[in-house]
Image (cartoon, rainbow, N blue to C red):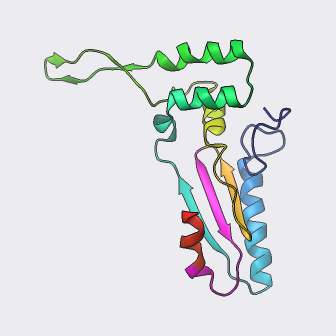
Amino acid sequence: MSGRRLLRDEQFEFRPKHSTVLQLARLVERVSRNFDKKKLTGVVFLNVAKGFDTVWVDGLLCKLKILNFLSHLVKTIPPYLHSQMFEVSFQTATSTSRRMWADLPQGGIISPALFSLYVNDIPSPSHHVELALYADTAVIAKVPSASAARQIPGDISQ
């Protein structure tokens, strides 16, 4: 994926020489530099709870087409994703099996890459805002004037 530059620069998963540790070091360096300059840095950590369970499969497939994935690859993925079924059991009763509409297989070998592509179109940060992404985690760091605490909620909502 890195050869075609499908992932934005802030995404550190599935890119050569980019790891969780490097992403964290990048953030710590930024905060430390601002601290040395006596600047405030507001940081918000976001983790998508059960992120793989929230992926809209048909939306993901549409994004893959928009990213110009090879058609045979796009056709191969739906059976893998649409084969997810569930049923509910209570005491001696069991419901009929139903298809899951929003889910990437947990532990699936391509699931992390598909999730990264799914969230890759998150809006770009505004001026003086840094974004750090790794799989289902995002960090938003604001490096503003002294009024950082008041500006962060507005920046997040944009």
Residue 27 position within the rendered picture, expressed as x and y whole percent measured from the top left: 73, 63
Q: Residue furthest left?
A: 92
Residue 157 in view in this figure: yes
Residue 66 against residue 51 in the figure, above or below: above
Residue 152 position within the rendered picture, expressed as x and y whole percent measured from the top left: 58, 73
Residue nearest the viewer, comparing 90 with 100: 100
Residue nearest the viewer, comparing 98 with 66: 66
Question: What is the count of numbered marks?
Answer: 0
Is residue 97 part of the magenta span, yes or no? Answer: no
Q: Residue at x 65, y 53 (%)?
A: 123
Residue 50 against residue 37 in the figure, above or below: above
Residue 16 position within the rendered picture, expressed as x and y whole percent measured from the top left: 83, 39
In the picture, the quarter occupied by the C terminus is bottom right
Residue 104 in view in this figure: no
Q: Residue at x 25, y 23 (%)?
A: 88
Is residue 142 part of the magenta span, yes or no? Answer: yes
Residue 17 position within the rendered picture, expressed as x and y whole percent measured from the top left: 84, 43
Residue 94 against residue 137 in the figure, above or below: above
Q: Quadrant of residue 30?
A: bottom right
Q: Residue at x 62, y 33 (%)?
A: 112
In the picture, the quarter occupied by the N terminus is top right
Residue 114 against residue 78 in the figure, above or below: below
Residue nearest the viewer, comparing 141 with 16: 141
Q: Residue at x 74, y 46 (%)?
A: 12
Q: Point out the stretch of residues depicted in magenta.
A: 136-150
